[in-house]
Amino acid sequence: MTEPSTPDTGDPSSAGAAAAPSTPSSVSAVAAAETLAPLDVDGVGAVAVGTILWTVALVLCLVLRGPLTDAGRGWWTWVCLTGALLGAAGYTFVRRRRTAYAEHPRDLGRVAV
């Protein structure tokens, strides 16, 4: 297999040298990192959506209980119930955590010992 040829730029220092990959210099990467702010994601939305989906699946499993049991899939109802209950517990946790962070924003990085 042959190497792709590089265009002649007229610069004698680049003669025969492979083109460098196009990566940002460390200076511009640091400048870009300083301008980007971290996402303010507390997990409440994700946990709420997951809990709602597990609850909808639970309702569907209860509606289709007979066919699921006949097919040997009656355990799906218990899985959905477990997902909904764990989601409700997780939702309570992330809401309390969000409230605590809002009340004490300076303590975000500290760990109690």
Image (tube, helix red, strand yellow):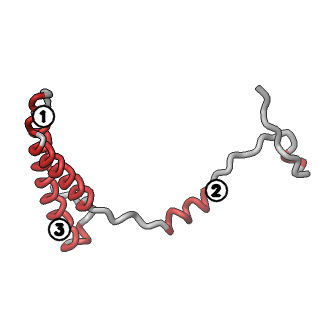
Q: Secondary structure at mark 2?
A: loop
Q: Nearer the observer, disc 1 or disc 2?
A: 1
Indicate which disc, 1 or 2, sits on the residue closer to the N terminus.
2
What residue is shown with label 3? Answer: 100
| Mark 3 residue type | Ala
Q: x, y (%) of residue 89?
A: 11, 54
Q: Nearer the observer, disc 3 or disc 2?
A: 3
Taking the image as shown, residue 52 lies to the left or right of residue 17, namely left
The answer to which quarter of the image holds residue 68 is: top left
Which residue lies at the image location 13% right of the left edge and 46% below the top edge?
58
Looking at the rendered image, the quarter that the N terminus falls into is top right
> Counting other residues with Cα less than 10 Å from the Cα at mark 2, is it few (<14), some (14-19), or many (20 or more)?
few
Indicate which disc, 3 or 2, sits on the residue closer to the N terminus.
2
Q: How many marks?
A: 3
Q: Nearer the observer, disc 3 or disc 1?
A: 1
What residue is shown with label 1? Answer: 67
Residue 112 visible, this angle: yes
> Counting other residues with Cα less than 10 Å from the Cα at mark 1, is it few (<14), some (14-19), or many (20 or more)?
few
Q: Secondary structure at mark 3?
A: helix
Q: Are marks 1 and 2 in contact (CB under 8 Å)?
A: no
Q: Are marks 3 and 2 in contact (CB under 8 Å)?
A: no
Q: x, y (%) of residue 76?
A: 14, 36
What residue is shown with label 2? Answer: 25
